[in-house]
Amino acid sequence: MSNKHHAATGNWRPAFHLSPPQGLLNDPNGLVYFAGRYHVFFQWNPNACTHGAKSWGHASSPDLLDWTLHPPALQPGERYDSHGCYSGSAWVMDERLWLIYTGNVRDGEIRHSYQCLAVTDDGIHFTKLGPTLEQPPAGYTSHFRDPRLWRERDGFHLVLGAQRNNGSGTVLHFHSPTLEKWTLRGELLPGSNNGYMCECPDLLTLQDRQLLLFCPQGQAGTGWPWPNANASCYTSRPQDSAVFDLPQALDYGPDFYAPQTLHGPHGEHILWGWMGRPEQPDTPSVADGWSHCLSAPRLLSWHDGELSQQPHPALQALRGEGLLLTNQAIHGNWQHAAVHGECAELQLSLHSEDASACHLVLRQGQHCHTRLSWLPATAELVLDTRHSGSAQGRISRAPLPAGNRLQLHLLLDRSTLEVFAADGTVVMSACIFPDADAQGISLQAEGDIHIEQLAFWPLNAMPVRMAASGESLTA
Ligand code: FRU
């Protein structure tokens, strides 16, 4: 659908997702819990809605709800990061907060990637310490970025996205006793089917398994497990094994990339991703001076051996007056006066008696709608954003566990839709740009579909305020 009938509007700025005050946001960076607050940094071009020289934007919150936007933590400009402070990670050591990031330097067509350190005592003002790893090891190109660092008893460990000299992508593992000299331990992904570059690796231990997240760039977007050419995926292995399982898509939707996790104060792992995609043309919100946002925080766990992502329970505090329904048969079309809106949470348990399809229609208006279809016979979930409003949409498909029941959990936030299906083991995220009047939600059944349970809440906005200059952190 064309965006002709849209003047610039403010209707798309998310109410409970972090978005940039102006300019373009991409990857979440340096996710860390420090001095009583969750810190979320992000790739940010504050000057334009384009992928220019990136800074690290910075937001923090004591509870994942009440956010403060701080001045940028890192800005490009040194000999080792003149063309961008690219993605990286954070850790806490000796009561200080440390960052490691990729300093991107362009010398005509030649790219240099330096892995650089920065540190802060107060959590706001960072001192750059320069490169800790100056260049890629022999056998790898300068597509060498997005360091994820953690500390163990034997020293520091680092995983990095890399490209082999033969043009294939992989993830490298380094070790250093002191942060001064790094030794390459090897490749975590030995195969040659991981695109031309693996961006944004993250390695963590989730309960009893090691989980590796990465983004294989340039994988053909022809189907499962790669929903598009810029997919984010995961693979895991038992802690005592050297071999990872076959990778799976982390999110089957069109707009989810570069995820990273935060190790929370209770041992939990919380994931954020960039809701956008590298090859996306200008988004309609550019007319309002901003582009892209982060996903909602998602809690990770294993569910019957599959990775499960669920909206973080902290978001429940945003719920308005809810509606709970049980046992409703759908004859053709189903609607309820209280179930509509642009900022909402919906939980649905459906049962099919040989139905061929059940369509959940969201953000429905006169000129647009977004459609999520359950096809029980082929055990598929199909998200159609081709008629969602302004911006070009597409059809995305996800495989479901077979069966005649479907459990769905959805978050709608103005220009975002996140679908958590089958206990969070099948996730789809999309950016949509509907008309302001497109608030309708309905179900359409082809055959016998039963709503076993439906819970619905309008969601309130989370407060985000700009820190005053010179302000210090308070928990
Ligand atoms: C992923 C990515 C990273 C890089 C950053 C630059 O979206 O390309 O590999 O560090 O974005 O903004």
Image (cartoon, rainbow, N blue to C red):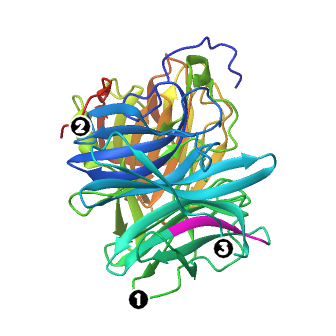
Q: Residue at x 24, y 34 (%)?
A: 472
> At label 3, which amino acid type do we have?
Pro
Q: Residue at x 28, y 54 (%)?
A: 96
> At label 1, which amino acid type do we have?
Asp
Image quarter of the C terminus: top left
Q: Which mark is residue 137?
A: 3
Mark 1 packing: few (<14 Cα in 10 Å), some, or many (20+)?
Answer: few
Q: Quadrant of residue 334?
A: top left
Tally of numbered tags: 3
Query: Nearer the N terminus, badge 2 or badge 1?
Result: 1
Q: Where is residue 447 drawn, in percent x and y?
A: 51, 47
Q: Is residue 277 visible?
A: yes
Magenta region: which residues? 159-165
Choose between 423 and 40: the one closer to the eye: 40
Q: Vertical placement of 190 versus 95: above or below?
A: below
Q: Quadrant of residue 145?
A: bottom right
Mark 2 packing: few (<14 Cα in 10 Å), some, or many (20+)?
Answer: some
Q: Main secondary structure of the magenta part?
A: strand
Which residue is labeled 1 in the image? 240
Choose between 128 and 10: the one closer to the eye: 128
Q: Where is residue 181 drawn, in percent x and y?
A: 51, 74
Look at the numbered disc 1 and give the secondary structure of its residue.
loop
Look at the numbered disc 2 and give the secondary structure of its residue.
loop
Q: Is residue 356 visible?
A: no
Q: CA distance from mark 1 to mark 3?
A: 27 Å
Q: Vertical placement of 145 versus 174: above or below?
A: above
Q: Nearer the viewer, mark 1 or mark 3?
A: 3
Look at the numbered disc 3 and give the secondary structure of its residue.
loop
Which residue is labeled 2 in the image? 473
Q: Quadrant of residue 289?
A: top right
Magenta stretch: residue 21 in it? no
Q: Where is residue 376 drawn, in percent x and y?
A: 52, 57
